[in-house]
Image (cartoon, rainbow, N blue to C red):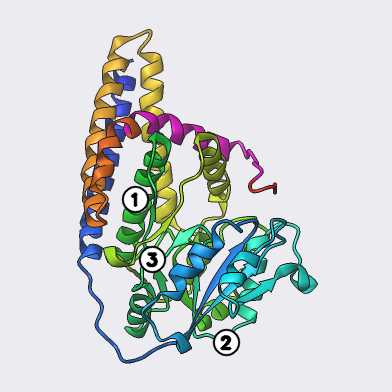
Amino acid sequence: MGVLAAVPPLLALVYGLWQAYNFYYWRRAAAVRYPATTERLTIAILVPFRNEAAHLPALVASLRQQDYPTDRYEIVLLDDHSTDGGAAGARELYPDIRIVRLQDHPDYHTDVAHKKAALRLGMDSTSAQLIVTTDADCRWPAGVLSELNRIAAAGYDVVLGPVGIAPVYDACSAFQALDVLGYQLFTAATAAAGTPALANGAHFAFRRTAFEGVGGYTGVDHLPSGDDVLLLHKFVAAGLRIACATSPAVQVTTKPEAGWRAMLLQRIRWAGKAGNYGSTALSVAQGLAFLTSLGILVGLLWGLFDSRFLWAAAVAWLFKGVADAVLLRSVSRHYGRGALMRWYALAQLIYPFYLVGVGTAALLGVKVAWKGRG
């Protein structure tokens, strides 16, 4: 039994070493700067949406304020069968905005991958060189397109952009903000290490030729989500050049899910595609984080009968907490979100339960409805 009690601390030690590896590459990624260029690629910003009438006007306003030549970029709103009026409010404010309705194009119909279908339709409706995707509830700083253009002009085929959660107004939104910051650090670290593993469709850019070269969503178009991560893994497999933008000035913000239940449903949906990942780095990261958290919880439970396990779980939890704190403090300060760390202790207490719960649901194949769809 004494040997078994050593398992949670050992798992936490391995986890800590893995986080040290990530920290090293995160610091490298955060220091990268891209050269100025006179080249101006044509850019299409694709916004797939469904029932986002309340959010679209503010998104379009932020996109229209980009410091990029207006004749070199376009905004394409992709209406995925909205029932709330769609983009009518945005069009009223911006009459020249382009709106493409998926329901008007039956050739793109799908029973599952609606967002991918909308994005395919959007790409087929533009000839832009650089495709940028975002979500309807996002807000964009003015310099994002210029930075994406700089990176692409430096020879990169794919750019992974930083995303943050805002506003933060309670424990749930703070938990999501810290969680997403952790994703951003891992995204940048794996890109710097040459093993890109994560992407976020709220801020994702790729050359049209790259998308066409890997066959688009073919092979992953049977899945309801994964228009970002699964596509990234196809890009990686094709040997394309991938960069991660880390400048605080180009962090796109997205709204938190409204409450714990909505957040858990979203995360379970994300986790449901894990079996289709083509990234060893991501599989190792998910497996190690899950096992470390599971070891802590099992140690706590067994500690009710044997105090050695209780102490082992406490040591493992403390070690994991310190490792995570170092990384999150660095990334939060980098993006000017250092105040989020006041929520860190609470988030760390919740996280093992959250991760084991979501991970177990994914392993059991739990399916959840999301935005009115299964």
Q: Is residue 218 visible in this depiction of the protein?
A: no
Height in image: 231 above or below 240?
above
**Residue 168, percent from left and from top:** 37, 44
Height in image: 79 above or below 266?
below
Query: Earlier along the polypeptide chain: callout 1 or callout 3?
Result: 3
Q: Secondary structure at mark 3?
A: loop
The residue under label 3 is 161
The residue under label 1 is 181
How would you rate the neighbour count of disc 1 (Cα within 10 Å): few for under 14, some for 14-19, many for 20 or more?
many
The kind of residue on which mark 1 rests is: Leu
Give the residue at x 69% y 47%: 372
Q: CA distance from mark 1 to mark 3?
A: 12 Å
Q: CA distance from mark 1 to mark 2?
A: 33 Å
**Start-end of magenta stretch:** 348-369
Main SS type for the magenta part?
A: helix
Question: Which corner quadrant of the image does residue 75 belong to?
Answer: bottom right
How would you rate the neighbour count of disc 2 (Cα within 10 Å): few for under 14, some for 14-19, many for 20 or more?
few
Question: Which corner quadrant of the image does residue 301 belong to?
Answer: top left
Question: Is 155 a magenta residue?
Answer: no
Height in image: 164 above or below 156?
above
Q: Secondary structure at mark 2?
A: loop
Query: Earlier along the polypeptide chain: callout 3 or callout 2?
Result: 2
Instruction: Please state if 253 lies on the left or on the right of 322 as rendered.
Output: right
The residue under label 2 is 127
| Nearer-the-camera pick, 337 or 320 | 337
Give the residue at x 42% y 45%: 286
The kind of residue on which mark 2 rests is: Ser
Q: How many marks?
A: 3
**Residue 352, percent from left and from top:** 39, 31
